[in-house]
Amino acid sequence: MKPERLAKISKEASNIISHLSQEEKNKALGTLEVLIEDKKGYLFEENRKDIEKAEREGIPKSMIDRLRIDDKVIREMRASLRDVIALPDPVGEITKLWKRPNGLMVGRMRIPIGVILVIYESRPNVTVEAYSLCLKSGNCVILKGGSEAYHSNLALYSLIVESLEKNGITADAVQFIKASERSYLYDLLKLDDYIDLIIPRGGETMIRSVVEHSRIPILKHYKGVCHIYVDDEGDLELAYKVCLNAKAQKPATCNAMETLLVHEAIADTFLPEMATIFEKSGVSIRGCKKTRKILKGIEEATEQDWYEEYLDLIIAIRVVKDMDEAIAHIRKYGSNHTEAIITRNYNKAWRFLREVNSSLVLINASTRLNDGFQLGLGAEMGISTTKLHAFGPMGLEELTVTKFIAFGDGQLRV
């Protein structure tokens, strides 16, 4: 199917999907949950094709693990669907209502965005997550998964279509791009008459390519250069636990800590123990000159290291003279993703919250918590580091916009 035809079908279907009831949407999602369990043998078989191809091509084991569909992934996909079903439907919610001097009642009501193109890599379960969130928020979705997971994504798409058809909902609500040519995607990126929003989920190179070719608004997430600042009034025992979790619990994620900033007054006490804890977990350390005077034998951090999203068991450490220097470092090198402060000083904590403008700012907690499920959104489409129109984890509400509504009784403009 030609790109324009596919996009036009989605636009036409959005007029139907935007008006589905919560019950209709939940029934379709519930049917999909059952199908994923009932037909997991089929999913395993199709997934095996992608795994075998990846192994033949010598793709790293860590990447192959992200491709794999096993019983654990099946359980996670089903749980994700149940979570979305349990969430309140945001469509039609009136978020504000106020009265004007002329008696006109003015409000804002949530409505779907329309047609969303989701471009993603590796993990097949994103197919289910993206679809479920778009359907529940009344949006049509066009899915463009990576070629490395083609058979897995196509199998999941077939179950999505089956679940819609079983519930009398047009299967045009979701489109799956089978074409692998980059030119096909680039043609879609120009169709701003039909597609309302693009959400790319993947590496920085892919996202920048989408931005370069698109005429359609994009919610971007280039990378996660996340920081933790350990203040001189911080609880060091708490800091050891939080910093280890932020770096080593799952290092290949966008919300893992990449740079640790430490107040110079506690560096001599804090860093040797922290380094020992890191090393036991396989974390290699790169440090500034002050850090290297305390931790002998570590690699020197270059200017590039402060910008780096390692996505690996590597940490850059800088000793700073105070919180001002820590905040200045974050402003210069950060990516507006996630930052945290470890402190027991109430005023410092609140100042850090006010002056650091990343999508999530935490006090005495791990950066790994920047996740839609962890923050109570039920599920997420991704984490936006742009500020229009969503910033941070994108749940159902972030897949809607608000329109103005007004209740009058003959009011006129004079």
Image (cartoon, rainbow, N blue to C red):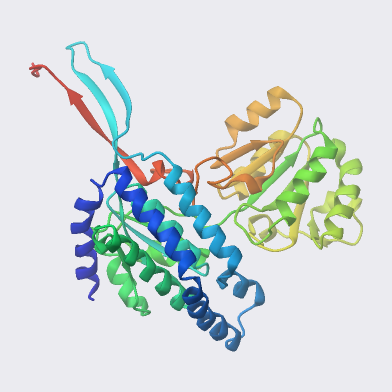
Q: Is residue 410 above or below residue 309?
A: above
Question: Count of labels shown?
Answer: 0
Viewer-proximal residue, 353 or 321?
353
Residue name at image x 33 percent, y 25 percent = 96
Q: Is residue 299 above or below residue 374?
A: below
Residue name at image x 56 percent, y 72 percent = 67
- Quadrant location, the N terminus: bottom left
| Residue 298 falls left or right of residue 315 | right
| Residue 15 falls left or right of residue 36 | left
Residue name at image x 71 percent, y 23 percent = 346
Q: Is residue 164 above or below residue 122?
A: above
Quarter of the rendering containing residue 390: top left
Q: Give residue 167's position: percent from left, percent from top.
A: 28, 57
Viewer-proximal residue, 280 or 414?
280
Residue 223 visible here? yes
Q: Give residue 34's position: percent from left, percent from top.
A: 44, 60
Q: Give residue 66's position: percent from left, percent from top.
A: 59, 69
Residue name at image x 20 percent, y 64 percent = 9
| Residue 231 falls left or right of residue 111 | right
Viewer-proximal residue, 75 or 339?
75
Quarter of the rendering containing residue 103: top left
- Quadrant location, the C terminus: top left
Q: Give residue 230's position: percent from left, percent from top.
A: 77, 39
Viewer-proximal residue, 129 or 74?
74
Residue 218 visible here? no
Q: Given the current orientation, which residue lies at the most extreme top position?
A: 101
Q: Given the current orientation, which residue lies at the most extreme bottom position?
A: 56
